[in-house]
Amino acid sequence: MAQIGAGMLVLLGVEDGDSEIDLNWLVAKVANLRIFADAAGKMNLSAIECAADMMVVSQFTLHASTRKGNRPSFIRAAAPAVSEPLYDAFCASMDEQIQKPCIRGVFGADMKVALVNDGPVTICIDSRTRE
């Protein structure tokens, strides 16, 4: 079982139409987000600056639509033939950005991920809106 200490869990959902352009923007954004505490306790350091561990898990269910009815639709999620290579490329690029290997989930597997959320920080980032 993989375990990370002070670090970041990235749930990566690949949407139909996502490309390497989206991937490159997203890697830079995530690696440079200033969400780790500095000596004064302020969120001021990036994963790169504090050598944080990172776990990346593929998560197509992030693209669930509950607009109609009570059964979620996953039609916006990219097919595995598209999303798996982008997931692998994201992980490889993140390895370069943070200068160490990120821990990877098993693509398409039914995994059990336990999380202790240390602090009130959960951030959704969408490469389409680029916020």
Image (cartoon, rainbow, N blue to C red):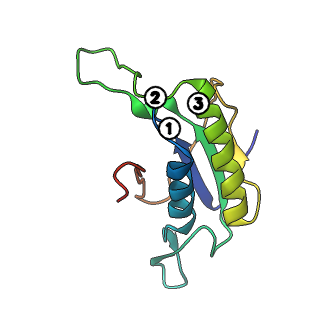
Q: Residue at x 50, y 38 (%)?
A: 13
Q: Residue at x 58, y 33 (%)?
A: 83
Report the Cα–Cα distance between label 1 and label 2: 7 Å
Q: Give the number of the disc on residue 42.
A: none
**Residue 61 drawn at (x, y percent):** 46, 29
**Residue 22 drawn at (x, y percent):** 50, 50
Give SS at disc 1: loop
Q: Are marks 3 and 2 in contact (CB under 8 Å)?
A: no
* Residue situated furthest left in the rendering: 68
Q: Residue at x 61, y 36 (%)?
A: 113
State whether residue 87 appears in this view. Answer: yes
The kind of residue on which mark 3 rests is Val
Q: Are marks 1 and 2 in contact (CB under 8 Å)?
A: yes
**Residue 88 drawn at (x, y percent):** 68, 41
How many numbered discs sit on the rendered protein? 3
Report the Cα–Cα distance between label 3 and label 1: 12 Å
Query: Quarter of the image holding residue 79?
Result: top right
Q: Residue at x 55, y 63 (%)?
A: 28
**Of the image marks 3 and 2, the number of the one nearer the N terminus:** 2
**Of the image marks 3 and 1, the number of the one nearer the N terminus:** 1
Nearest-to-viewer mark from 3 and 1: 3
The kind of residue on which mark 1 rests is Gly
Horizontal relation, residue 9 to residue 65: left or right: right
Q: Give the number of the disc on residue 77.
A: 2
Q: Which residue is mark 3?
A: 82
Report the Cα–Cα distance between label 3 and label 2: 10 Å
Q: Give the number of the disc on residue 13.
A: 1
Query: Quarter of the image holding residue 74?
Result: top left
Asked whether 59 or 28 is in front, the reply is 28
Q: Quadrant of the C terminus?
A: bottom left
